[in-house]
Image (cartoon, grey):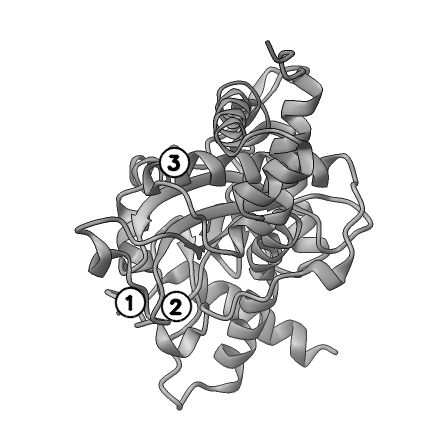
Amino acid sequence: MRDAISAEKRLAVTMYWLASGDLFRTVADLFGISEGSVCVIIHGVCKAIVDVLLPQYIRWPTGERLRANIRGYEEVRNFPQCGGAIDGTHIPVRAPAGEGPDFHNRKGWYSMLLQGTVDYLYSPHPFRTRFTDISIGFPGSVHDARVLRKSDIFKRGDRGTLFPQVFFVLLCVWQDLTKEIDGVQVPVMLLGDPAYPLLPWLMKGYADNGRLDRAKTHFNFRLSSARMTVECAFGRLKGRWRCLAKRLDVDVGRVPQIVGVCCTLHNICEIHGEGFDMEWFFHDVVRQRAQLPQVEEAAPNDARDAICRRFALEEQGR
């Protein structure tokens, strides 16, 4: 009878596979176990991480953490009233039987979409960000805006509970985080790209029709620079956990679990200051903005216009 595989070895097998994305057969040969054992081990360890660690490490910012996040975006990223950034990325998958066309993305390969929101880790390192919410499961052909509307983020935003008031225990008062900018009360918002709708809690740039004035062009530049935090997060996520950069050769039903594990481990690494070699950084070529249809704007947005005017005044004062 073979000896039971230790917990340490099970964890090592799983971490190696997540970081390398190697074939199960390769991992089995490396660790001296069967290919079937590799599959069982990875599934078991991933389930434990999702059940125990994910709720601890992927959490929506509230209280002082939210305030620090807003300060970080304003002082370091130069954008006010930002509670985080949102975007999507494609995870390469094996085409599921009978559903291939749904998973066929704009670049011509099969994928599943990960929608992620990130906050700003207020630290000396400019690229450290952590996931605050993830939504994974939609096939690669689905538009980012539809993924958003089906997510919990949208439901909370629609209810007005995405960025609630902050309670200060010592003062025993509630403080509203809304801030007046150029005569307009501006709420805390997420930053998104042109693929998303413009909402009271979701800020995007002005539609570039080729005739934008200097102020709006500058606003778009500032917003794009601030929301780079989420693109950096995806690049670092796939750089550390290469299984997400290669085709996940597992049943498509298990992909959300694996992605959830990698996002959890990403947060653990970022929070504890684990090293990251920028040569690992994964450049997400599928996210070419010119290929993403822009969502039309229903009406002017007072908050966006107010921030735009403030940015224009700041630029003039330089």
* Residue at mark 3: 254
Whether residue 201 is visible to the viewer of this picture, yes or no, is yes
The numbered disc on residue 295 is 1
Crowding at label 1, few (<14), some or many (≥20) Cα neighbours within 10 Å? some
Tell me the residue at 77%/34% (across/down).
272
The amino acid at mark 1 is Val
Q: Please identify the quarter of the rendering in which residue 211 is found.
A: bottom left
Which of 24 and 2 lies nearest the eye of the viewer? 2
The amino acid at mark 3 is Arg
Q: Position of residue 282 (x, y in %)?
A: 61, 62
Q: CA distance from mark 1 to mark 2?
A: 6 Å
Left or right of 208 in this view: 50: right
- SS category of the residue bearing label 3: helix
User: From what the image shows, is residue 195 above or below residue 2?
Assistant: below
* Residue at mark 2: 194
User: From what the image shows, is residue 175 above or below residue 281?
Assistant: above
Q: Position of residue 148 (x, y in %)?
A: 32, 49
Residues at marks 1 and 2 touching, judged by CB atoms closer than 8 Å: yes
Q: Nearer the viewer, mark 3 or mark 2?
A: 3
